[in-house]
Amino acid sequence: MSQFLLRFAPSPNGLLHKGHAYSALLNAALAKKYNADLLIRMEDIDTIRCTQELKQQTLQDLKWLQIPYKQPVLWQSSRFHAYKNALNYLAKMGLVYKAYLTRKQITQFIKSQEEQGISWPSDPDGAPLYPGDDAILSKSQLQKLSDEKAPYALRLNMRRARQMLNSPLYWQELTPPKTSVDLPAFEQVDTIKTDPSAWGDMVLARKDTPTSYHLSVVVDDAAQGITHVVRGQDLYHATSIHRLLQHLLHLPAPIYHHHPLIKTSAGEKLSKSAGHKSLKELREQGLTRQELLQSMPSAITNNL
Ligand code: GLU
């Protein structure tokens, strides 16, 4: 049995593009080099946007890419009970609260702060930090919202969570390879200090979606025994949150590698929403797997 376990974890809420292919192929190349198993986890917690068609297409793309993975595929939509348990555990520690502010209220609050010359901080994804309900709503307004069963998000009380840490938290990150010919080496790791406060009171779940990406990814990386999380650079800062949740939930921490993102020739990040071509479209236009591989860094082609 292999000592290492990797995973590729797409969200089938849209079609995969070249960036996903790079991530999946890099995982496959590393799995081969280190004789590790590679698992597929479908992050389909958004049960409305993750349609049957997109889920099937994602599996089809992985087949076309010839990603050798170990069955069975884990579907997050079948694991809501596990995320609920984790959420309840955090709630029992007094770390979760119901947050009622609407987007409009938050925007208005920030505008009023800025009018007073206070620049309001944003999280690493660019979203403004949650101001806290009591910054805007009175106790009776909050009570009314609760009585009316108004929609809410369940948020982490970051201040309290930080108080539970006796010392700074760190994560292990594979040292980036020096050239595009090399894969990262499992033997070379850097220690990175987390900065979870940068995220403020982040969302753990919503009234209608009983979990969030951050909560479920941490629960499942532990449940599946993942040793190395290899994913895009866009999730680098999210690792601070993941490490904090692992600490609070007493879960093991995998080693991370955040790989560079494949960009367009204009330097843009590939995205479904910006209309960049999906693998399906590229394939329908005649792209072969071999041609796709040739457009990838040679570390991948040399190691598949
Ligand atoms: N599901 C996430 C995505 O498609 C990736 C999660 C992860 O690798 O941690 O962006």
Image (cartoon, rainbow, N blue to C red):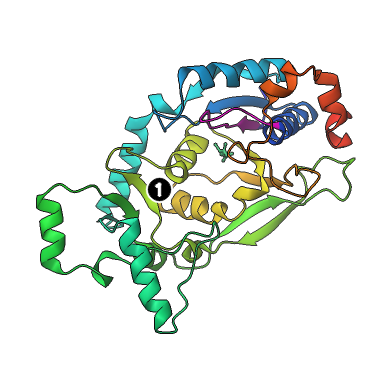
Instruction: Identify which residue is drawn at 14% across, 53% down.
Output: 146
Q: Mark 1 points at which residue?
A: 249
Instruction: Identify which residue is drawn at 76% across, 43% down.
Output: 264
Q: Is mark 1 within 8 Å of ligand 1?
A: no
User: Quadrant location of the N terminus?
Assistant: top right
Find residue 293 and report its horizontal and vertical position in percent. 83, 26
Magenta stretch, overall SS: loop
Q: Is residue 193 positioned above or below 288 on the image?
A: below
> In the rendered view, does 19 fall on the left or right side of 266?
left
Residue 257 vs residue 273, the one in the foreground: 273
Residue 66 appears anywhere in the view: no
- The quarter of the picture where residue 262 lies is top right
Q: Is residue 34 positioned above or below 177 on the image?
A: above
User: Quadrant location of the C terminus?
Assistant: top right
Disc 1 is placed on an element classified as loop
Instruction: Identify which residue is drawn at 75% across, 44% down.
Output: 263
Q: Any magenta on residue 119? A: no
Tell me the magenta residue range.
Answer: 5-17
Q: Check disc 1: other Cα within 10 Å, few if <14, some if 14-19, many if 20+.
A: some
